[in-house]
Image (cartoon, rainbow, N blue to C red):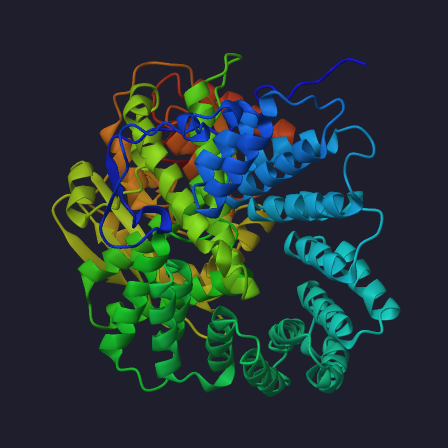
Amino acid sequence: MRKIYAKNIYTNHIHISTGSWRLQSMGIRRKGWLFLPIFFFILASCGSGIEDAGLPSELYRQAREHSHRGEYQQALGCYARGLEGENLSEPSFEAVRALNEKRSLEGLTGSYAAAFATTDLLAGLPKGSLTDSLRTSMAVDRSRWLGELGQLKEAADALDTLKSLLPEVRLQQASYALRGGFIDRAEGIYGSLVSSQGDPIIQMHAWSGLLQCGARRPGVVENDLLDMARKIVALSGRVMSTKDRTVERVQALRHAASSLQLTQKHRRDASFLLFRALSIAGESGRPFLVEVLRLESNAAIVRKSDPFRESASYFEMKNMPYAEAMAKFMLSGSEGVDPEERTTALQGGFVAARDAAPPWPRPWMRQLERDALFQLNGQLLANSRIFELFDASQQSSMLRLSRALLRRADLFRPKGAEPDTMMAEVRTLLQNMGGLRQRKVDMLVNAGGEERRRAADRSLNMQYGRLLELLSSLRISHPVAAEVLSFNPVTLRTVQHALKDDEVVLAPVLSDSLAALLVIGRRNVQIASSRLPFDSEHPAASLDLNLRRELGASSSPEAMRGGEWEWFARSMEQPAREAVKNYRRVIVVSDALLPLHLFDGVGNPSSGRQVSFLHSYRELVILRANEALPPAASEICFYDADDQDGPAAHKMFFPRDRVFIIWKPYGEEALEEMKREIGTSMQETVSGAAALQALRRDNPRKWAAVSAYGVQ
C-alpha cells in the first residue's frame, strides 16, 4: 500500500505584524492600541529543548498547552509539525485526534479554507479510522461554517451526508433551508418532525418553523397562519412544564415567540412566552442567554427605554457592536425617549454597526436598519440638519458597501489564466472576516455561543491587521481596491472636492412620511423637498421595489400610468429638475437605486445630461481620485437594479470595467447585443454614461431601462 504522509497540510498563514492598528476596525472596538512583537517565532515555541521535542506526541502535547492558553496560532504550528511525520495510510489514534483538534481550532479562528481542507483530509482516511460521533461532529461543524459564509444550501446539504440525523440537527438543517429561500425543503423537514416526534420541545420548534415557511409564501394573509399559531400556543404549556432541559425549553419558547410575532393576533402570546422564557432562563446560569431574552422580551410589546439602554451597554461591554446597534435602534422607538436622545441613539447605532454588520443579516435586522434610517432621516429633515443628513446617509452607505465587499469577495480574482497570490490572500481574508462577523451576530440570534467571542475578536483583529499590511503592495496593482478596503469614511467637504464644476450629486433621503433630495455641488449643498408626503397607499419602505416592478413590466416610462411611478414623478420630478438645471452631469447616490434618470429634465435625451448611479459617497471619492489609471483591457458588465452588492463590488475591484444597471429582465442574447452596441458607441468616448446618452437619443424606448454605474 502506498504510504500517505501529512505533508504541507498546515494551510494557515502565520504573519508577522510590524505595526499596529485600531481594534475598532471591522467590529473590534476596544479602546487603545494593540502592539504585536516584531519577532514572533511560532515554530520555535513548539520545541522544548529535550530529546522528545520533535516527536508527534510531544508536539501535540505542546499544541494542547498553547490552545489551553488561547495561543491558537502557535498551537496550529505545533499540530502541523507533528502531523508532518504521520503515516496517514495507517493513522494512529493520536494522529486522528490531532487532526480533529487542528480542524476545530481552524474553525474557531475563522480560517475556513484550512478547516475545510483538514476536514476533507480526515474524511478521506481509511475506513474505520473515524468513529460515528466524530463523523457527525465533522458534518455539523462543516454545516455551521458554511452557514457563516452565507452558503446556506450547501450548509443544509452537508448534513445529508449523515446516515441518521437527531431531531435537533434536522431542525438546524431546516433553518438553513428556510434562510436560503428553499421553502419546500424546509417545510418538508418541519412537517416530518411534527408527525414523527412526541417531544413537545421538538414539536414547538417544528410548528414555529412551519409558520415561518407559511409567512414566506407569496400572497399569504394572516388567516392562513392562525391555525399553526394556535398549535404553537397550545404546546406552550407542555413545554413550560417540562422538567429540566432548561436551555432547550428557553430556545423553543424563543423560536415560538419569533413566529407568533408574524401574526397581529398572537403578539401578546409571543410577549408572554418571552417573559416566561426569561424567567426560566434565570435557572440556566447563563447570563448571556438572560441578557438576550431581556432585550427580546422588552422589544415584543412593552418597549421600555431603560432595558434597551442596559442592553446596549451590556453588548458594548461584551464587544458586540452590531448587537449594541440593534439595542440602540430599538431604544429610539421606545416611549419616554426625548427627540435628542432618539437622534443620538440612532446615530450611535449606525456608527456601531458600520464596521461590524454581518454579511448575511436576518430579515428583522435588515428591517431594523431600514426603519432606523427612515426615523433618523425624518428627524433630521424636520429640522433641516443638512450636515447630519449627509453623515447619516454616509454611515448607512458605508455599512452596505462593507457588506457588499465581504459578500462578493469571490469576485476579486485575476481575469487572466495566471494566478495572483496577493488577490487570493485578500479574497481569503475578506471571506474569513465576513464569516467571523456573521458568527458574532449569530451569537445574538441564537442567544448562545458567546464563549467563542474572544477567539473571534482576536482572529478578526489579526486578519484585518494582515489586510492592512497588504494594502501598500496592493495599491501598486489594484489602487482602487486597496483604497476601499481601508474602510475609511469620507466627509462632505471631500465629496464636494471630488466633484467638477458641472457635476451634481442627487441623494434621495427617505423617511416614513417625508422625502427629499440632498443636492451636493462643488460649492453648495441644499435640500430639495418632495411635493407629496408618503402615505399608506404609497409607503416609503416599498418605493424602490414598486418602481422597479413597474419599470420592469412596462414597455416604456410613458406606459407607467396610474401607479407608483406617476405618484413618484408628481412628488419628486419638479424638485429634481430644479436641482440639476445648472449642471451637465448628474450622479445619483443611493442605497436603494431609484430611476431618477427617467425624470423629464433630469436624464431624458433632450436634456443633454449624463446620469450615472452609485451606492455610496465613498465610491465617488475613490473613483474620482483614480481616474488616471494606466490603460488596460476592460469589460462591459450588467447588473440588475435590485442587486445591492454586485455593481459596487465589481466597480471597486475592477474600476476599468464599464458597469451598467438594467431596470428590467433581459435574455442573454439581448444583453450580448446591448454590449456590442455600447462598445461601438464607446469608440467615440471613454464614458459609459456618454455612450448611453447617445444611444438613448437614437432609441429612447430601448435604452430607458439601462443606466451607467460609476463616475463617468
Q: What is the quadrant of residue 540 in the picture?
A: bottom left
Please state, as top left, top right, bottom left or bottom right, where the C terminus lies in the image: top left
- Location of the N terminus by quadrant is top right
Q: Residue drawn at (22%, 40%), measured in percent from left and top?
A: 503
Q: Is residue 565 left or right of residue 317?
A: right
What residue is drawn where x is 44% and y is 46%? 70
> Residue 604 falls in which quadrant of the image?
top left
Relative image position of residue 647 (x, y in whole percent): 45, 38
Tell me where residue 43 appears, x and y as whole percent: 43, 26
Q: Nearer the viewer, residue 603 or 320?
A: 320
Q: Is residue 322 above or below residue 222?
A: above
Taking depth in this image into account, of 119 and 594 the one nearest to the observer is: 119
The number of callouts visible is: 0
Front-most of residues 287 and 603: 287
Residue at 25% from the left image edge and 78% from the top image edge:
339
Expressed as whole percent of the image width and height from the top left, the position of residue 80 reads 54, 27
Q: In the displayed image of the protein, which residue is found farthest to the left? A: 523
Q: Position of residue 343 (x, y in %)?
A: 27, 71
